[in-house]
Image: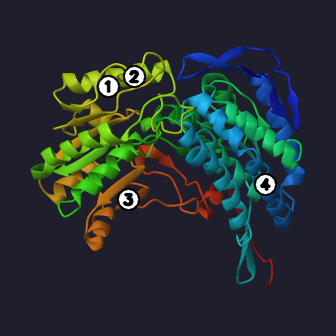
Amino acid sequence: MREYKQFYINGEWVEPTSPNNFDVLNPATEEVCATISLGNETDVDKAVAAAKAAFETFSQTSVEERIALLERIAEVYQSRIADMAEAIRLEMGAPISLASTAQAYAGLGHIMEAAKVLKTFAFDEQLGEHRVVKEPIGVCGLITPWNWPVNQVSCKVAPALAVGCTMVLKPSEVAPLSSYLYAEILHEAGVPAGVFNLVNGDGPTVGTALSVHPDVDMMSFTGSTRAGSLVAQNAAPTVKRVTQELGGKSPNIILDDADLGAAVTRGVLHMYHNTGQSCNAPSRMLVPRAKLAEAEAIATAVTADMVVIGDTAEEATTMGPVVSKVQWDKIQGLIGKGIDEGAKLVCGGLGLPDGIERGYYVKPTVFSEVNNDMTVAREEIFGPVLVMIPYDTEEEAIRIANDTPYGLAGYVQSEDIERARKVASRIRAGNIHLNGASGGTDVPFGGFKQSGNGREWGAHGFTDYLEIKAIEGYGAA
């Protein structure tokens, strides 16, 4: 069992001011895999003070220095990629095949992308006799979730470092192991003392202390809409910037001219990816009513033939558990709600999958004949549960797609790319995927409506960490 009870503050591993042990469970076994300590307001004060002091010098470093720093971080990260994958497997139950590829490499990808963007990023522009410059915003409070743990850490830390900010990270206490390793990587790469700080803890204590802190200049939060709203409320009195990447209930519109087999297969597998624990998962599949029965049959076959549930250490496993008993109970309750409200259970359902006796595993589940007023169509389930909603016309499909408080992602399937583009233009969401396409780390990621504000990834991800200063009378360039 691992013990990660120290915090990383001012370039050193330090003891908590008041140790408060917290067990981290492996959701595949329900056994303790690590122990951390939860921090408090005093720990946050120390970390913020270190970041504030470090900002004075780090904000003045050259672009060339920060490029070199990011490249060193990427090099060290690459050497620890297997360790990172194992940490993610243990802390949140990702199958090793997923943890080794998508999960662990996502963190590396954001570091490499930030270095690439920084090489050509324009920090100033001339407007006649005046100069407009972009400067680092200051001390950043970063709060990250458990579902894509190092991805969400890295897509905040990398751009903040790139533009010259300093920061305090509070990772999820449910899945903190990858963040601890991330701190080790930054330390080995030579990130200056105080530039990056890590304090473990829960949202009500450490998260709130960061959000209200007068010396924190911006908060970047990824997590639930409810928690994101609290961060914004706590940050409001100090008028700091708040960026949020929150929940989703993303529509997947399969138009009547789409290749139904390919579209349904793609949608079902995407929904099950990461055990459905992705905020942009295509959780509402909109199907032409005349093709609903055929879509149900395809979904059933895909679930039976292509999903392998089991030991997360086995390469053959494609679906692991959900992250915790709390999540398992929530998902079971929502599956039960779908049954009670009259949705047609196509496959899956309540309880553990066949042959599984321990671990927070959920049966991959498909509901059909769902209407958009049902609970399973409204609430973000955050598990491997797909709902199929029939529609009669393209206009109705668009209306249903937009009938949600969320707006993170949308998916459109059509053999006619022009038709797909037109439908995409009418969906109120931050990321639209046509015919299974997916953007890289250079494409902005973020949502409309209650899915958040601001953008992460690539050059667009630099923006929220910058202040804009106009210097009038600067003179000609």
Q: Residue at x 61, y 29 (%)?
A: 91
Q: Tell which circle, 4 or 2, labels the residue nearer the N-terminal end.
A: 4
- Residues under labels 3 and 2: Cα distance? 29 Å
Task: Describe residue 165's horizontal placement relative to residue 106 as left or right.
Answer: right
Q: List x then y, in percent, for residue 271.
A: 37, 43
Task: Describe residue 164's horizontal placement relative to residue 227 as left or right.
Answer: right
* Cβ atoms at labels 1 and 4 below 8 Å apart: no
The type of residue carrying mark 2 is: Lys
Task: Give the residue at mark 4.
Answer: 75
Q: Give the number of the mark in front: 1 or 4.
A: 4
> Quick check: 447 above or below 149?
below
* Cβ atoms at labels 3 and 4 below 8 Å apart: no
Task: Give the residue at mark 3.
Answer: 436
Image colouring: rainbow
The type of residue carrying mark 1 is: Leu
> Quick check: 388 above or below 158?
above
Q: Which residue ends up furthest to the left in the rendered image?
A: 290
Task: Give the residue at mark 2.
Answer: 330
Q: List x then y, in percent, for residue 232.
A: 56, 38
Tell me, yes or no, if residue 195 can be seen here: no
Q: List x then y, in percent, for residue 2.
A: 74, 22
Q: Give the number of the mark in front: 1 or 3.
A: 3
- Secondary-structure class at tag 4: helix
Quadrant containing the C terminus is bottom right
Q: Tell which circle, 3 or 2, labels the residue nearer the N-terminal end.
A: 2
The type of residue carrying mark 4 is: Glu
